[in-house]
Amino acid sequence: MEPDEYPPEGGAEYVLHLYITGATPNSTRAVRNIKEICELYLKGRHELLIVDIYQQPERAQGEQLIGIPTLIKKRPGLVRRLVGDLSDRARVLAALGLPPLPPSDSTNG
């Protein structure tokens, strides 16, 4: 796949792009957190593109990013942006329009 090509978006209900800066602690946490959220809440219904802006700086310019890491929800609905390591799960789920898991499924309730 060419760097400027996006993966096909035909089948994914949720299209998410995460912009990171290498293997910094915040970027590493953001990748881990969004992968866990996708596995728990969006399994089989999402497309996650992770872009390291050190390797693809042109993508950062095109998205007008103001902080890194940044998660951009492209679909469904309105485009939403979240800046940070995505550790506030309730905030991330709200931005994605997803209900939280019932308290019985969470140990830190």
Image (cartoon, rainbow, N blue to C red):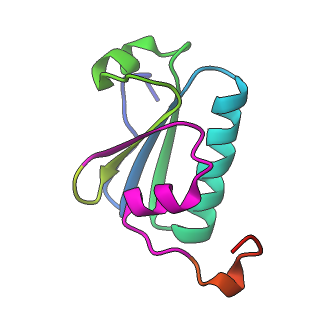
| Vertical arrangement, residue 58 with respect to residue 39, above or below | above
The picture quadrant where one finds residue 64 is top left
Extreme residue toward the front, this view: 109
Q: Which residues are magenta?
A: 79-100
- The image position of residue 25, as x and y in percent, is 73, 28
Q: Is residue 12 visible?
A: no
Residue under the image location 45 percent in, 66 percent down: 45
Residue under the image location 38 percent in, 13 percent down: 58
| Vertical arrangement, residue 44 with respect to residue 86, above or below | below
Extreme residue toward the left, this view: 78
Extreme residue toward the right, this view: 107
In depth, the one of 96 and 84 nearer the eye is 84
Q: Is residue 91 left or right of residue 104?
A: left
In reply to whether residue 81 is colored magenta, the answer given is yes
Residue under the image location 48 percent in, 16 percent down: 56
Q: What quarter of the picture does the C terminus occupy? A: bottom right
- The image position of residue 61, as x and y in percent, is 33, 15
Q: Is residue 94 visible?
A: yes
Residue under the image location 38 percent in, 51 percent down: 15
| Vertical arrangement, residue 60 with respect to residue 106, above or below | above
- The image position of residue 42, as x and y in percent, is 51, 67
Count of labels in the image: 0
In depth, the one of 54 and 80 nearer the eye is 80
- The image position of residue 81, as x and y in percent, is 36, 41
| Vertical arrangement, residue 103 with respect to residue 21, above or below | below
In reply to whether residue 25 is colored magenta, the answer given is no
